[in-house]
Amino acid sequence: MRSLLKRIVPLILILFVFAGCVNTVPHLIDGVTPPPAFTSAPSTQPPEQSDDPAIVTAAPNSDENVDALGNHIYTSDHYERYLSFHNVLVYEDEGETLVDLTITNDYPELLLCAVNITFFNEADEKIASSSLQMPDGSFLLALESGDTPLYARVLTDIVLTDKRFELTFDPQTGVVPE
């Protein structure tokens, strides 16, 4: 009988220990309201008025902060959302590395930008780069609504057709409407 008690008592104790931790989900207790975490005293001073009309900021809903589609402009990269790249082709031709692609402008107005292509090796190190050009050879891309073919000639002696690449907007030029 003693040996049976020696086996059962530890099992019962373990059961009681774990039984106390069954419900760990927080719950509200009716009638108990915690005090507010922060209370501020109302200001006794009236707000100051400025007689200087030169200090004027654009209202959040003013026309200056809205694009032609009615979307609010909050960041400098706002117009990038309207541009997308398609049919990117990296190939070799007579010892040159060339890139052909199509950029689509979904904005109803002309957008100006510059785009760079950067190639990386397996160790994620930059191995080559170039700037995309319009069909007329211009590096400043004037993109009408719709599709525009672009190209780049990459000066390198490394085969890039199997390398990872990134297309990035030039930060100094940005993407801006004309």
Image (cartoon, rainbow, N blue to C red):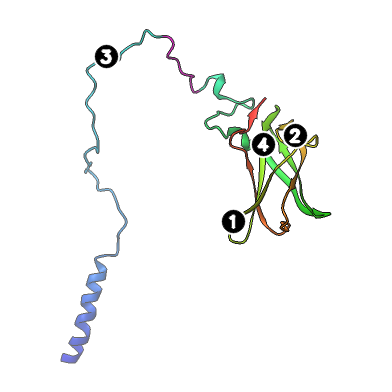
Q: CA distance from mark 3 to mark 1?
A: 60 Å
- Between disc 3 and disc 1, the foreground one is 1
Q: CA distance from mark 4 to mark 1?
A: 23 Å
Disc 3 is placed on an element classified as loop
The residue lying at 37 percent from left, 7 percent from top is 51
Q: Which residues are magenta?
A: 53-60
Disc 4 is placed on an element classified as loop
Q: Amino acid at mark 3?
A: Pro
Q: Is residue 33 left or right of residue 133?
A: left
- Which residue is farthest right? 94
Residue 1 visible here? no
Q: Is residue 79 or residue 133 the one in the foreground?
A: 133
Residue 9 vertical placement versus 139 (above, below): below
Tell me which label, 3 or 2, sits earlier in the chain: 3
- Which residue is farthest top? 51
Q: CA distance from mark 2 to mark 4?
A: 10 Å
Residue annotated with mark 4? 114
Q: Amino acid at mark 4?
A: Ala
Tell me the quarter of the picture where residue 72 sits. top right
Tell me which label, 2 or 1, sits earlier in the chain: 1
Residue annotated with mark 1? 125
Residue annotated with mark 3? 46
Residue annotated with mark 2? 138
The residue lying at 69 percent from left, 45 percent from top is 130
